[in-house]
Image (cartoon, rainbow, N blue to C red):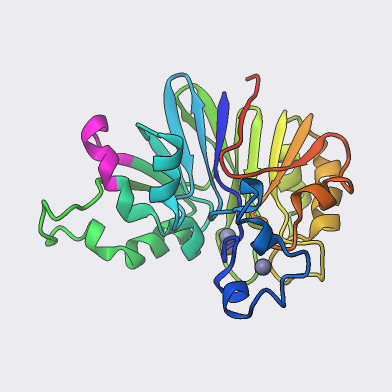
Amino acid sequence: MEIIFLGTGTSHGVPSIDCMIEGHARCRKDVCRLSETDSRHRRTRSSIAVVYKGVTVLIDASMDFRSQVLRETIRSIDAALITHAHADHIGGIPDLRSYDRSRGTPLPLYGSPESIGAIRSTYSYIFDPATFIGGGIPSVDAIPVTGPFALWGETITPIPVAHGALAGCLGYRIGPLVYIPDMKAIDAAAIDRCCGADTLILNCLREGPEHVSHLTLAESMDLARKISPRQCFFTHLSHDIHYELDRTKLDPWMHFAYDGLRIAIIS
Ligand SMILES: [Zn+2]
Ligand SMILES: [Zn+2]
Ligand SMILES: [Zn+2]
């Protein structure tokens, strides 16, 4: 199984528009300016592609989806898993249309009932039979999920997490991989679903202060130690995470992800 980090940034992306407007005064580690010369600090909105058994499963379609798949030369997408319906995770859904021809069947797109409902209303034209066909509508089969299901020989297990006031936010386990890009809290039953995974990819917004809907660095490390995978990659990073300075604070098996990073894991 190969994981391709399409994007590793929080909803603002790095560099952020805010720091550009305010002259970087609010950028306390100067990461937005550093991103101009160090690509590990250039963070598009979070998403991964998981490649196994010859298929490519996309987790989230970010606002930066188009530039990400062009950058990584992603030639096919066979299914999509959506963690939640915030704009930074579903903003790329219209661009999924480009993969329709090569696949020839509607794209199975999975999410919680709440996420599927929000996608149906946000992109109502995709699901409205009265919409003019031929206008570039992605062919999508939106499937609400409430429990584990099989996909090309791997069990996909939704992991319910709390993410601010939003209902129906999920992480996913795909065999040896757990991906949770956006969360603040997780209960014991959901942690159980993560245990025994080889690789954990977990959200880590910033060093501090505490945030209402995201984990900070200390909280992310605590949760990673509880789940205790072989390796952990932090993602959904803001401009408050400096790749070099902050990696010294991590346990040896923890890493910060960056856009374009590819890792292979054993199923
Ligand atoms: Zn997000
Ligand atoms: Zn900044
Ligand atoms: Zn979110």
Residue 144 can be seen, yes or no:
no
> Measured from the top left, where is residue 170 in percent x and y?
58, 52
Give the residue at the far front of this rendering.
Answer: 37
- 120 left or right of 265? left
Query: Residue shown at 27%/64% (left/top)?
Result: 124
On the rendered image, what quadrant is the N terminus found in? top right
The image quadrant that residue 34 belongs to is bottom right
Query: Residue shown at 78%/64% (left/top)?
Result: 29
The image quadrant that residue 74 belongs to is top left
**Which region of the structure is painted magenta?**
97-107
The image quadrant that residue 193 belongs to is top right
> Measured from the top left, where is residue 265 in percent x and y?
65, 23
Give the residue at the far bottom of this rendering.
Answer: 22
> Measured from the top left, where is residue 176 in percent x and y?
65, 28
- 82 left or right of 97? right
> Measured from the top left, where is residue 99 in percent x and y?
29, 38
Residue 91 forms part of the magenta stretch: no
Q: For ligand 3, which image quadrant applies?
A: bottom right
Which one is in front, 72 or 165? 72
Residue 100 forms part of the magenta stretch: yes
Which one is in front, 139 or 24? 24
Magenta span: chief secondary structure = helix
Which one is in front, 163 or 254? 254
Looking at the image, residue 193 lies above or below residue 47? above
Query: Residue shown at 38%/49% (left/top)?
Result: 66
